[in-house]
Image: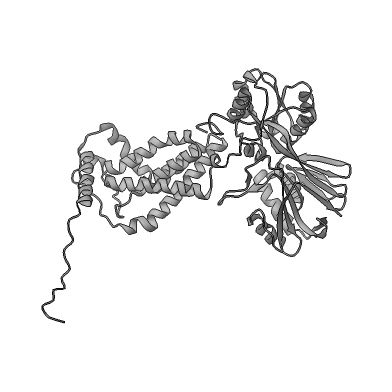
Amino acid sequence: MSPDVDLTLPAPGPRPLRDGLMRLDHRVFEAVATRDWPAATRVLPRLSRGANHGVLWVAAAAAVAASRTPRARRAAARGLASLGLASLTINTLGKRSVRRSRPPLDAVPLVRRLKRQPVTTSFPSGHAASAAAFATGVALESPGWGAAVAPLAGAVALSRVYTGVHFPSDVLAGVLLGAGAAFAVRGLVPTRAQLTPPARPRAEVPALPEGDGLVLVANIGSGTSDRVRALCDALPKAEVIECAPEDVRAELEDAAGRARVLGVCGGDGTVNAAAELALRHGLPLAVLPGGTLNHFAYDLGVEDARDLCRALEAGEGVRVDVGRFASGGRHGIFLNTFSLGVYPELVREREHWSPRIGGWPAGVLGAVRVLRADRHPLEAEVRGRRRPLWMLFAGNGTYHRRGLASGRRLDMADGQLDVRVVHGGRWPALRLLSAALAGPLTRSPAHAAVRTPRLRLTGVAPGTLLAYDGELTETEGDLTLEKLPEALTVYRPLSGHEPGGTAG
């Protein structure tokens, strides 16, 4: 190689856009640092410290969830999940990718500065990312609660510049990253608004101004007083009967004889009894969720009294399918699910223990006891083939799972039974778990799933325990399951605001 060859790399040329943005960033920082805001000086540094390690947002989530509405609880959980993803991204990628120094504190008054200065790199702002992630996550589930949380999140983001620990661009990047984390969580776990069932087939139902013509029976054993009070305030002309669980059936029978619209407030078992009477009397049904799970009401799109009252006063309703089972002389309907095998046993154990230790602990204890018990699987002939079964599940409509979200129905009138079978064999717990994680139309040696409008099971031993909508009974021999397409007319809001109202 010739000694005259020059290998010196050229110096980087000017970058007008980047340099201009950096100068703007510094000018905005200095403008904030030199501006005197007495009220902000008393509040923003405290907010900035309170947001350390997400403490402020955990407290905010607890406050939102304390309203005890399903939408508020979901909004709080989504906000915390979004915050967790944003924090993980910041700590693993953000801070290590751009090693930017913190701003100089010369221009920041001493009274504003944090007592403990951060030692990590400046870009992006983790506090701003957490604030934006929490607020955006809450807003995606409940716009009302999101609007309530947004000013607090904005104040925390501003505090990071005001106290001198971040440049404005650090905060802006953190806000964008946090909002992106919230949308990423929504991609994994869709919001209720994304999964709202279709408003079809529409039904002609009477509008009830102030609830005139509604007779609603409320099961006080489900803890329904707050929901019933809200409905009474909104619909003063409605007749509301509160009764003990053992009197619900008789009160529903009486109400169905004089109501223009039959209403019910309680858990899925209570709703099942009301639906059976509504079918018999040809009445539309108004369901106010009042139990623990409320699968039917929530899948329908009715989450609280505001949803139901809006539908009743506007005269908005749909027709939905009903499942029916028959075994010998015994028959019934199901709005949600029907099952044989392990699940009815679990329900029986849960009902035995729940008065002593509470519902959720009883469910866990029941599952442990059932899966550890030395029992043989039941046997039945399904579609011409006889084989042992650990469980047969039939859903009134297809249950979907999107991303990591739990199963729910998106169409309440699809004309199909969603049948899942867990075959007998060794390791029942493992088989049940694999079936729960599998998709809706899977087949394997352990489980299978089909959709059908009708199913007949022969060879089922009389006295076999079965469960429908959380209620228990025994078979009288062979079983037939079938759909009653669009048999039940129910109220649900079809226009106006999203289900669940605004802030809660």
Q: Give the camera-side residue of 210 and 202.
A: 202
* Figure quadrant of residue 10: bottom left
User: Which residue is drawn at the image coordinates 65% and 55% (left, top)?
Assistant: 436
Colouring scheme, one of rainbow, by chain, secondary structure, one colour = one colour
Q: Quick check: 284 above or below 179?
A: above
Q: In this view, does 355 lie to the left or right of 306?
A: right
Q: Is residue 208 left or right of residue 10?
A: right
Where does residue 379 sit, x and y in percent of width and height?
A: 82, 57
Q: Quick check: 424 above or below 284?
A: below
Count the marks: 0
Can residue 21 be seen at all in this image of the molecule?
yes
Q: Is residue 106 left or right of residue 459?
A: left
Tell which residue pokes out farthest to the left in this image: 4
For the N terminus, give its image quadrant.
bottom left
Q: Give the camera-side residue of 46 and 344.
A: 344
User: Which residue is drawn at the image coordinates 29% and 32% (left, top)?
Assistant: 39
Q: Give the camera-side residue of 441 and 226.
A: 441
Where does residue 192 sit, x and y in percent of width and height?
A: 56, 40
Can residue 375 be seen at all in this image of the molecule?
no
Where does residue 501 sit, x and y in percent of width and height?
A: 54, 31
Q: Quick check: 184 above or below 298?
A: below
Where does residue 175 sit, x and y in percent of width and height?
A: 36, 45
Q: Quick check: 457 above or below 319?
A: below
